[in-house]
Structure formats: C-alpha cells, structure tokens
Image (spheres, rainbow, N blue to C red):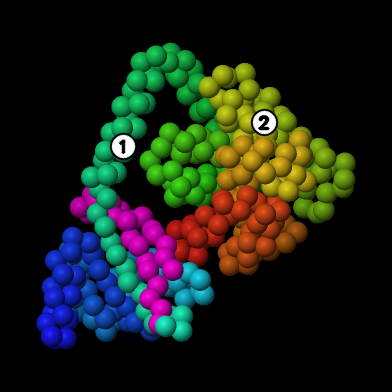
C-alpha cells in the first residue's frame, strides 16, 4: 500500500502542468518533473544530484544564491520571482517554497514554475485597450506632454552627466521602483505612473547651484537647506501640466519620512503619496550603494540592512518589506 501511494504521488507530480523542482538542504536537486524539464530546457537525469544553480544562467548565480539563503531564514515560507523565457516568448511565475521538519529546521525547498503567459497577454491587452481609449480623447494633449517629458528626461540626463557620481541615478531608481510596483500591482497603469515619477523625481535639482551639488565635502546647514529646495522646484516645474500633477506631488514629497520628520512638509504615514514612499526607498538604496568623493559605495547587503533598520521611521513598512523581499530573492539590487 505504501509503495502504491508513493507511485501515485510520483505520477501526479509528473503530470502536473506546473514545473516542480525539489532540492535538499544542500541545494542539490532531488527531483525534476516533466513540466520543469520543458520550462527549464533541461533533462532530469542529467541534473539530479547537481546544484540547483545549474538550472540558471551563470549571470544569475549570485541572485539565486541570495534567494536560497533567504529561504533558510526562520519565518520565511515562500516568495515568488517573475522570469521570461525570451527564446520561446513565455512568462513564468516561480514560487520558491521552504520545506521544514517538525522542529522548524530547513530541510529543502520546492520550486514551482507556472506559465502565466496567457494571463500576461490578457493583462497587456486590457492595458492597451484602456490606453487606446484615453489616447483618442487626449491625443493632442498627449503629444505635447510627451514632448515635455522627453525634454525633462533629457534635462535630468544632462544634469546627472555633469557629475560622474550621480550618473544614471534616476534610471536606477526607476528600475527598482517599477519592480516594486509590479510586485504589488502587476500590469497596471499605476506602474507606468510610478515609472515616470521616479525618472523625474530629481528634476528640481536643475535649480540647485552646481557648486553645491558637486561639493566633495560635507555641506553646511545653509547649503543643505538649499539642496532641500529641489523638491519644491521640481513641483513647480511639473505642476503646470494637469496630467503630470501626480508626478509633481511625487517629486515634491520623495524626501518625506514615514514618521513625519522629513521635508518639505513633514508629512506622515499615508499622508505621503504612495509613489513618493516607493521612490524614497529606491532613492536611498541607490545613494548608499553609489560612491561619492567623500566616501566609498556601501555594499548592497549592508545597504539593505540599513533600509530594514529604518522601516517604520524613515520608510513605509509595507513598501520596505516588498523592497527587502525583492532584494533578498535576487530580483533587485
């Protein structure tokens, strides 16, 4: 009876449409079902006994190692990562599930890969449909806005290009903010709003004196107060466009703190725009992990610990946990 039960379970797992990979506590592969072979483009008999890293591109090794280490943490049960098979143009949602014994000791993990391509296509079609409806009504206004946004992006790029220590900052912040937003909202117009806001969050720095922006040493109180004005200037630049008021608010408030001690208005908690709370985390992480004339870049793991330390004071708890989940699972950072 026991043997038949094992055979039944094995047959069921083999026939599941989801890819199933089971690894032991040493990260070696114990089992691979047929769906996982197709999804991963591997053969089970060639990978059993090998490290689960062998199922991933070499460029992903460090992130996968970080993800597996994350699973070992007490209290961690599962997390998910989105991956794209560019060869076959398929999208997959990989769920990593920790397996623990009766004493809560980590004894392995199960990686479940589900094909979400059809769902993504429907979401993309819905998004496109909504965008087309809006486009018919606001085509002319959209063209003007697009020209303005393009000019603002060029202005940000030109501003950052003058300082090798901040070059690419806005694009890196944008990349992290978008991944955080996608984690919560999926394919949504909200993500597009957050993408634009994060690209332009520092536009107000065009009104800050270059000598202060590029000063290699510590700023005086007067200089720091001048730097803080970039949030107000950014709002003033973006506010005249009705369709960009959400970007203006995000730019103005991305230095607010969750406990109300930030600037310029000392907003607290959910008084702070949601987009600003996202940008605040990505902005701080990129600043810490970027070199400056007066200090070396902080290591990613250390910067993540700093984010964790200030959740609930400087950073929104919900978005802070999303950032850390994506960081430790190797999706960002």
Q: Residue at x 32, y 68 (%)?
A: 111
User: Does 5 appear in magenta?
Assistant: no
- Compared across the picture, whether 25 is left or right of 175 comes to left
Which of 4/95 is in front? 4
Q: On the image, numbered disc 1 is attached to which residue?
A: 124
Q: Main secondary structure of the magenta part?
A: strand
Residue 123: percent from left, percent from top: 31, 38
Residue 49: percent from left, percent from top: 27, 84
* Disc 2 packing (10 Å; few <14; some 14–19; many ≥20): many
Which of 40/277 is in front? 277
- Compared across the picture, whether 259 is left or right of 316 comes to right
Q: Residue at x 62, y 18 (%)?
A: 240
Residue 307: percent from left, percent from top: 64, 59
Residue 151 to residue 328: above or below: above
Which numbered disc, 2 or 1, marks the residue closer to the eye?
1
Residue 267: percent from left, percent from top: 72, 39
Indicate the quadrant where residue 5 lies. bottom left
Indicate the quadrant where residue 80 lies. bottom left
| Visible residue check, residue 320 | yes
Furthest toward the bottom, the residue is: 2
Q: Residue at x 68, y 24 (%)?
A: 236
Furthest toward the front, the residue is: 1
Q: On the image, numbered disc 2 is attached to which residue?
A: 234
* Numbered tag placed on residue 308 in the rendering: none
Q: Classify mark 1: helix, strand or loop.
A: helix
Which of 195/19 is in front? 19
What span is colored magenta in the figure? 77-101
Q: Residue at x 46, y 47 (%)?
A: 184
- Compared across the picture, whether 305 is left or right of 183 comes to right
Q: Classify mark 2: helix, strand or loop.
A: helix
């Amino acid at each position: 009876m026991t043997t038949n039960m094992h055979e039944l379970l094995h047959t069921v797992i083999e026939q599941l449409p989801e890819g199933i990979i089971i690894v032991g506590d040493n990260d070696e592969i114990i089992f691979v079902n047929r769906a996982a072979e197709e999804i991963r483009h591997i053969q089970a008999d060639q990978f059993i006994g090998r490290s689960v890293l062998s199922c991933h591109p070499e460029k992903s090794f460090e992130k996968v190692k970080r993800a597996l280490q994350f699973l070992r943490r007490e209290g961690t049960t599962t997390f998910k990562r989105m991956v794209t098979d560019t060869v076959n143009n398929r999208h997959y949602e990989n769920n990593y599930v920790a397996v623990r014994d009766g004493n809560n000791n980590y004894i392995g993990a199960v990686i479940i890969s589900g094909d979400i391509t059809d769902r993504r296509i429907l979401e993309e079609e819905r998004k496109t449909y909504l965008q087309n409806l809006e486009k018919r009504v606001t085509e002319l206004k959209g063209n003007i806005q697009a020209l303005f946004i393009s000019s603002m992006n060029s202005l940000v790029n030109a501003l950052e290009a003058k300082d090798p220590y901040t070059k690419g900052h806005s694009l890196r912040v944008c990349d992290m903010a978008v991944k955080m937003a996608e984690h919560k909202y999926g394919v949504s117009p909200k993500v597009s709003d957050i993408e634009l806001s994060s690209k332009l969050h520092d536009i107000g720095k065009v009104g800050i004196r270059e000598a202060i922006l590029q000063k290699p040493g510590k700023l005086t109180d007067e200089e720091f107060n001048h730097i803080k004005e970039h949030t107000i200037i950014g709002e003033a630049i973006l506010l005249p466009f009705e369709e960009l008021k959400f970007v203006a608010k995000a730019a103005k408030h991305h230095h607010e703190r969750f406990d109300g001690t930030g600037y310029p208005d000392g907003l607290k908690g959910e008084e702070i725009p949601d987009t600003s709370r996202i940008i605040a985390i990505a902005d701080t992480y990129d600043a810490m992990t970027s070199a400056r004339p007066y200090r070396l870049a902080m290591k990613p793991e250390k910067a993540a610990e700093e984010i964790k330390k200030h959740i609930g004071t400087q950073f929104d708890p919900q978005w802070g946990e999303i950032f850390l989940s994506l960081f430790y699972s190797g999706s960002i950072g």
